[in-house]
Image (tube, rainbow, N blue to C red):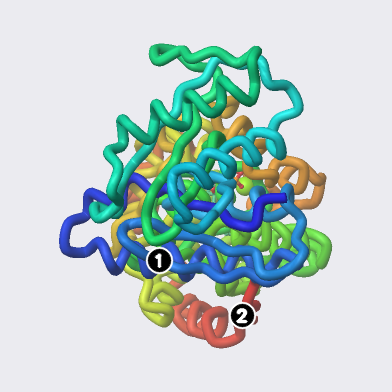
């Protein structure tokens, strides 16, 4: 029934002279999101507003859901767009709007007019009271309540006039593409997809790297990560996913280093390799799903020793989250069900029964010296032989 949506965006309006860059990114992300929805849409930007016109039949629910995944959108308003044919006609349009949108007409209401077109001859207050009067005439059970109305009927007067009463919440955040690019270490678990989502929400373009250990980890485990990347990409837009064959490096560490240090040493190599891909993709930071104390490799001491190999900043947006809080976000963004599929993980296969929880950097570095002979070449091979999948 609605043919137009008005898009409200908050944070980006504050951005002063960068504003147009933000609006352009938002329009681009909206177009991308709508390209996945059946139907033809035109997205236009004018006077600090973004409008979406539906040029063909379309699925309302699906369209709203797609828009609810576009960071930067604060509100999605389904609007009736009418031409300015005078106040009397506008009154009829508002009545028609209420007839079409609501079955029941006994709510309390208030009309809120915004006259963005300053040449419009009638003051907002006068439009409010005119339209209010017309509504009361048409629907005798409706009543005016200026303080706490059940129905707030917005009338925006611009070159066209927009009538709406619903503001469907958007995800907030900043449009992807306005804050640079970062490399997500994406595993098949619950946490890392949520971490990617959270950084994407700050406007960052996401690429990803997954460490695969065939035959210890199966094709199904890899497919699960591809599927998770797809789910994250519904919010962030396309993700370049690098699948690194990590088996030889893991076996080499297993062979040469004390087993209680495997996890920490392996994690240091993951970070190093992730930085190599970051350099190739132009990413300026790494992202992980780590959270203090969640597992042995995430004590402060472990995080510090892992971090020591990194030159780029490492974003850990879940650092202070409880598992339950992470699960809530995972459910909200629909990654949870995929994350809990029971496929093996390259870290779990080689973990020791009692991994060190308070690693000492000097000790770890000394153990790593035992890898000297072949490790550089192995890292090189891992980087060069990685498979890159473009996920949308
Ligand atoms: P997740 O649920 O994200 O897998 P986790 O609780 O299993 O996290 P760890 O296995 O210690 O925790 O991993 C910590 C972080 O390291 C992950 O959030 C992810 O960013 C990264 N990571 C772990 N394993 C891999 C992997 N195989 N490939 C890419 N990144 C990984
Ligand atoms: Mg994991």
Seen at 67% across and 69% down, the residue is: 55
Task: Judge left or right: residue 121 versus residue 176.
Answer: left
Rendered view: 115 above or below 138: below
Residue 21: x and y, percent?
Answer: 29, 68
Residue 118: x and y, percent?
Answer: 24, 52
Residue 26: x and y, percent?
Answer: 43, 62
Seen at 46% across and 23% down, the residue is: 110
Residue 369 seen anywhere in this rendered image of the structure: no
Residue 357: x and y, percent?
Answer: 46, 35
Kindly report which numbered mark, 1 or 2, lies closer to the viewer in this rendering: 1
In-front residue for pair 208/367: 208
- Circle 1: element type: strand
Question: Which labelled disc corresponds to residue 388?
Answer: 2
Q: CA distance from mark 1 to mark 2?
A: 35 Å
- Circle 2: element type: strand
Instruction: Give the labeled residue for mark 1.
Output: 45
Task: Judge left or right: residue 276 versus residue 334.
Answer: left
Rendered view: 116 above or below 23: above
In-front residue for pair 24/229: 24
Which quadrant of the view contains residue 330? top right
In-front residue for pair 115/205: 115
Ligand 1 within 8 Å, label 2 CB: no
Crowding near pointer 2: few (<14 within 10 Å), some, many (20+)? few
């Amino acid at each position: 029934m609605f043919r137009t949506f008005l898009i409200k965006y908050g944070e980006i309006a504050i951005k002063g002279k960068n504003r147009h860059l933000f609006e352009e990114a938002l329009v681009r992300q909206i177009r991308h999101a709508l390209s996945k929805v059946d139907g033809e849409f035109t997205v236009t930007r004018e006077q600090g507003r973004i409008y979406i016109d539906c040029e063909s039949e379309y699925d309302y629910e699906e369209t709203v859901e797609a828009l609810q995944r576009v960071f930067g959108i604060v509100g999605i308003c389904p609007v009736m767009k009418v031409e300015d044919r005078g106040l009397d006609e506008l009154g009829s349009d508002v009545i028609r709007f209420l007839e079409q949108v609501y079955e029941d007409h006994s709510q309390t209401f208030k009309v809120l007019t915004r006259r963005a077109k300053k040449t419009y001859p009638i003051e907002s207050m006068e439009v409010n009271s005119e339209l209010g009067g017309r509504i009361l005439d048409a629907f005798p059970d409706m009543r005016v309540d200026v303080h706490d109305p059940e129905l707030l009927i917005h009338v925006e007067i611009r070159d066209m006039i927009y009538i709406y009463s619903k503001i469907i919440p958007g995800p907030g955040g900043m449009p992807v593409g306005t804050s640079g690019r970062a490399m997500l270490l994406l595993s098949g678990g619950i946490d890392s997809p949520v971490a990617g989502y959270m950084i994407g929400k700050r406007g960052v373009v996401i690429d990803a790297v997954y460490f695969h250990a065939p035959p210890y980890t199966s094709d199904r485990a890899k497919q699960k990560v591809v599927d998770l990347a797809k789910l994250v990409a519904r919010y962030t837009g396309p993700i370049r996913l690098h699948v690194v064959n990590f088996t030889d490096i893991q076996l080499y560490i297993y062979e040469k280093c004390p087993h209680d240090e495997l996890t920490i040493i392996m994690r240091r190599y993951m970070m190093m390799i992730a930085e190599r891909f970051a350099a190739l993709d132009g990413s300026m930071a790494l992202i992980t799903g780590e959270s203090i104390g969640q597992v042995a490799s995430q004590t402060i001491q472990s995080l510090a020793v892992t971090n020591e190999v990194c030159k780029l900043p490492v974003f850990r947006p879940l650092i202070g989250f409880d598992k339950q809080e992470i699960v809530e976000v995972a459910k909200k963004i629909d990654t949870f069900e995929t994350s809990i599929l029971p496929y093996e993980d390259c870290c779990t296969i080689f973990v020791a029964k009692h991994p060190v929880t308070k690693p000492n950097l000097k000790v770890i570095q000394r153990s790593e010296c035992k890898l000297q002979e072949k490790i550089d070449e192995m890292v090189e091979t891992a980087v060069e032989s990685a498979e890159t999948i473009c996920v949308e």
